[in-house]
Image (cartoon, helix red, strand yellow):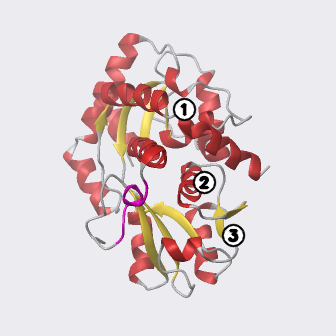
Amino acid sequence: MIAPYIARHSGARDVRVRIMTGGGGIRGANALWFAEPDGRIIAFTSVTTLILSQLAGSEAVRFDATRFVYLGRAATEPRVLTVGATSNIANVEDARTLGRPFVFPSQGTDEDFYSMAVLADVLGIPLKVISGYDGNADTALAVIRGDGDGHITGWSASRAVIEAGDEMPILTLGQDRYAPWPDIPSALELVDGASREAVQAIVNMLDMRRGFFGPPELDSEATAELRAAIGAALADPQLVAESVAQGLPLQPSPGEAEQIKIEQITEASQHLVPMLRAALEAIR
């Protein structure tokens, strides 16, 4: 959706999109890490996953997320933990007192996997991760069928199944409660002390969400041109209208702001490392 507008505002003849699946974005980020820093190859993915995978010590990671050059965020939104409507879980306390581990279907070691691992740790929820699912639709179906207890997605992706009565939200991961569902608590309300710091770090990472970035030591002139082009593309009224029509609203942030953000996040998140590495070890 965005690529033609980057072409329009950069003056490029073409912007070709190559999908590189694998590891929740890790395979693509590894490829970018070794790319020529001339501005001709950039990436777009969940920046949150890259940071969390690196902090967890994932053996698949070949990059240092702090050395990528950030070019602009396209979108972000709070995440939500939902459970099946027919389950006996109606709130976080029910998840704590199931009498067995909370079963979490996962599509891999992405931001939702790591977010759930941290939540389970700080909220005292025994957790069992079942990996190998193919995207949000697959994990949602598992939760609706009862093969899993709950999963984490964006609020927009969950809206249809919640409104249809197939899933119920029990917790949001954001700075505040999500306005359309004001009765659902934020995870930050349920913790304090070191646990709150851990959740706050996750919330800050999730705020970076979907963004563009280039390889380390990206040419300074190319960096300036790409940041300007991406910023202009994301502000293009035609793209804004298209994003709303497709249900993919934009919440842009400039590359300079995202560069500062990632430096602050990685420095403040070292206390998460034991939780993240334990979660990764548990599914090996």
Q: Is residue 42 above or below residue 180?
A: above
Q: Start and end of the magenta stretch?
A: 184-191
Q: Is residue 21 visible?
A: no
Crowding near the residue tagged with mark 2, few <14, some 14–19, many ≥20 C-alpha atoms within 10 Å = many
Crowding near the residue tagged with mark 1, few <14, some 14–19, many ≥20 C-alpha atoms within 10 Å = few
Residue that numbered label 1 is attached to: 270
Residue that numbered label 3 is attached to: 101
Does 187 lie within the magenta span? Answer: yes
Q: What residue type is disc 2 on?
A: Ala
Q: What residue type is disc 1 on?
A: Gln
Q: Is residue 9 above or below residue 139?
A: above
* Pointer 2 or 1: first along the chain: 2
Q: Position of residue 156 (x, y in %)?
A: 38, 65
Residue that numbered label 2 is attached to: 117
Q: Report the Cα–Cα distance between label 3 and label 1.
A: 27 Å
Q: Give the side of residue 50 with respect to residue 77, left or right.
A: right
* Pointer 3 or 1: first along the chain: 3
At a point 53% along the width and 60% down the height, the residue shown is: 123
At a point 40% along the width and 42% down the height, the residue shown is: 204
